[in-house]
Amino acid sequence: MRPSLIVLVLALALPLPGRAAYPDRPITLIVPFAAGGPTDVVARIVGESMSRTLGQQIVVENVAGAGGTTATTRAAQAAPDGYTLIMGHMGTHGAAPAMYPDLKYDPVKSFQPIGMAAGTPILIVAKKSFPAKDLREFVAYVKANSEKLNEANAGVGSVSYTTCAFLNSLLGAKPSRIVYRGTGPALNDLVSGQVDYMCDQIVNLVPQIQAGTIKAYAIAQAQRSPALPEVPTTKEGGLPEFQVTAWNAIFAPKGTPPDIVSKLSGALRKALADEGTRKRLLDLGADLSDTAAQTPEGLAKLVESEVARWNKVLKSAGATPK
Ligand code: ASP
């Protein structure tokens, strides 16, 4: 090879001037809720494996507020350099536009999807002393007493808020809706009996259900979960209309360079193929079967359909702001 050609080949192989090879420093993964809840748990499990693949630490930063929309706005406005990501979910990137007419971001246009980290079935759970032994009794009790009950959720637009808004509308229930900075702290209050019931993502609930510190009335999907085989579906329990599932997924700000997107999405998919990481998620009831949504393109499609779906569900439930 001629010396000038060698120089050219070497030059093409080197990173662009001014941009060191990505990633050359820690990456921040914003969790838009308090630590210890489902979004946080998924972020930490997946982030650990991605850190190993990328050779840089993924640092989880919890920024709670406004049902996750405060942090999601911040992530949308961050520099699109691959160093600020967000673990969003069906609330922040699906339901929120229907609940906030002046939302400062667009789930579709403001983000570059990286991929879904976990599908998270929804359960109806209550404090241990709740006076109902199964879903039929729960439904009857809530219908008769809802004004005396406290329902816990992670704020307007969150998964727990929107799914329970749907449940409450099906039951004609009007409980006091108690807002927390995430369903981690909400679950603590459910365990101690300070609130009565909530709708939440399975990955937050399995250990407490197994320990018998809370009651699980139903899982709101067609099949029972292998992680909680004793919990009936809403269809089995007599409330087949209550079918909802949620998910958590990683997003980067719009404009993130394609080579960085592909590194991140490769690291995410590697995490979801890793036996140890899979086991931790599956033991918590996560659904990892939607491999299409684990890609940037698949997640983009999912977000679009979720925004449309939740807009319809929440409007017909009368749950959107008047
Ligand atoms: N899953 C919760 C929600 O949106 C929030 C959290 O992850 O803490 O209801």
Image (tube, rainbow, N blue to C red):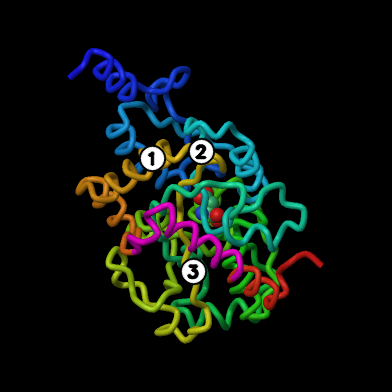
Q: Main secondary structure of the magenta part?
A: helix
Tag 1 near tag 2, CB within 8 Å: no
Answer few, some or many: residues within 10 Å of disc 1's Cα (few below 14, many 20 plus, some between 14 and 19): many
Mark closer to the observer (3, 1): 1
Disc nearer the start of the sequence (1/2)? 2
Provide the secondary structure element on which disc 2 rests: loop
Q: Residue at x 41, y 57 (%)?
A: 205
Q: Sequence-wise, which precedes: disc 3 or disc 2?
A: 3
Of pointers 3 and 1, the one earlier in the residue sequence: 3
Instruction: In the rendered view, tell whether residue 234 sits above or below residue 226.
Output: below
Residue at 31% x, 66% y is 228
Secondary structure found at label 1: helix
State the CA–CA distance, disc 3 to disc 2.
Answer: 38 Å
Residue 131 vertical placement versus 301 (above, below): below
In the image, residue 211 sits, relative to residue 308, either above or below, namely above
From which residue to which does the magenta span run? 290-308
**What amino acid is at disc 2?**
Thr
Label 2, on which residue? 256
x, y percent for residue 288:
32, 59
- Residue tagged by mark 3? 124
134 relative position to 14: left or right: right
Name which residue type carries label 3: Ile
Residue at 82% of width from left, 67% of height from top?
Answer: 322
Q: Quadrant of the N terminus?
A: top left
Residue depth check, mark 3 versus mark 2: number of the one nearer the observer: 2
Residue 214 visible, this angle: yes
Residue 177 is left or right of residue 18, and the answer is: right
Q: Is residue 119 magenta?
A: no
Foreground tag (1 vs 2) = 2
Q: Position of residue 321 (x, y in %)?
A: 77, 64
What mark, if any, has residue 264 been given in the picture? Answer: 1
**Residue 299 image-quadrant placement:** bottom left
